[in-house]
């Protein structure tokens, strides 16, 4: 058994309340500003992801678009036919050392092909690239009915020297995140940590639900009060 300290990285919620009250798509989670210089590598068939908490004390929202950061040391194309599949989960699954694991699938991108970030047209020779999802145009908006959910992805097709990972960031500017990550190799969810920052660089935009606006105005700071939680996870 290994003790994992789950640190909530606090969002700047002060200026968010006014934006939320406007009732249009706005940033509800943003951890894309402070790059740690580390990445969380993918292994074929293993799903990795972060449980995140909406900013501004929001308890529900409709996700309209999101993005996340990927890293690869490759400056050429992959040797294999690398594909990714992205999920958003409600944390309503079975307990893992006392914490609800990812359960109900709220969003499933289906498989799509990938190349290293250095091959992304907009990035030129960069080793870090951004993957964007516009749910309004390409999928359907996703309703989040609690303050937290898990964002995760799985990769297949890596061969030889192929490598790819989530770029890791610290100090979310909007919303909260934890110092561990969910991982599933097909046998069940685990809570893991690497000893480095484990917060995936990501940004989510959403339209607040009407019932959320009043709650945000009244209790936006309550989440900030719980800065630490501890839990046990099997390694």
Image (cartoon, rainbow, N blue to C red):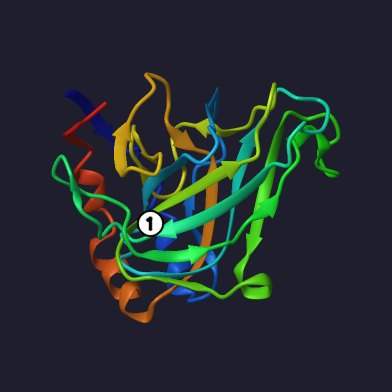
Location of residue 134 in the rendering, given as x and y in whole percent from the top left corner: 65, 65
* Quadrant of residue 70 within the rendered picture: top right
Is residue 40 toward the left or the right of residue 192 in the image? right
**Residue at (70% x, 21% y) in the render:** 161
* Along the viewing direction, whichever of 20 and 137 lies nearer the viewer: 137
Element type where label 1 sits in the image: loop
One can see residue 185 in this view: yes
Q: Is residue 235 above or below residue 227?
A: above
Is residue 102 toward the left or the right of residue 81 in the image? left
Q: Is the N terminus in the top left, top right, bottom left or bottom right quadrant?
A: top left
Residue furthest to the bottom in view is 210
One can see residue 11 in this view: no
Which residue bears the numbered disc 1?
Answer: 54
Q: Is the C terminus in the top left, top right, bottom left or bottom right quadrant?
A: top left
* Along the viewing direction, whichever of 14 and 99 lies nearer the viewer: 99
Residue furthest to the left in view is 98
Is residue 3 toward the left or the right of residue 102 in the image? left
């Amino acid at each position: 058994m290994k003790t994992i300290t789950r640190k909530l990285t606090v969002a700047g919620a002060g200026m968010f309340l006014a934006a939320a009250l406007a009732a249009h798509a706005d940033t509800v989670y943003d951890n894309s500003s402070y790059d740690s210089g580390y990445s969380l590598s993918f292994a074929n068939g293993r799903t990795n992801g972060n449980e995140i908490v909406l900013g501004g004390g929001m308890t529900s929202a409709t996700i309209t678009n999101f993005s996340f950061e990927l890293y690869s040391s490759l400056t050429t194309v992959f040797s294999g036919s690398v594909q990714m599949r992205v999920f958003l989960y409600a944390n309503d699954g079975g307990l893992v050392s006392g914490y609800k694991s990812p359960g109900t699938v709220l969003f499933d991108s289906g498989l799509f092909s990938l190349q290293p970030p250095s091959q992304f047209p907009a990035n030129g020779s960069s080793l870090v690239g951004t993957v964007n999802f516009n749910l309004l145009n390409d999928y359907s908006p996703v309703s989040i009915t609690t303050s937290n959910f898990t964002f995760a992805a799985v990769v297949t097709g890596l061969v030889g020297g192929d490598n790819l990972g989530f770029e890791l960031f610290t100090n979310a500017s909007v919303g909260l995140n934890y110092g561990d990550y969910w991982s599933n190799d097909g046998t069940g969810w685990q809570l893991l940590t690497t000893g480095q920052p484990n917060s995936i660089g990501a940004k989510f935009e959403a339209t607040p639900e009407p019932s959320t606006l009043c709650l945000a105005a009244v209790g936006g700071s309550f989440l900030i009060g719980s800065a630490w939680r501890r839990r046990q996870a099997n390694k």
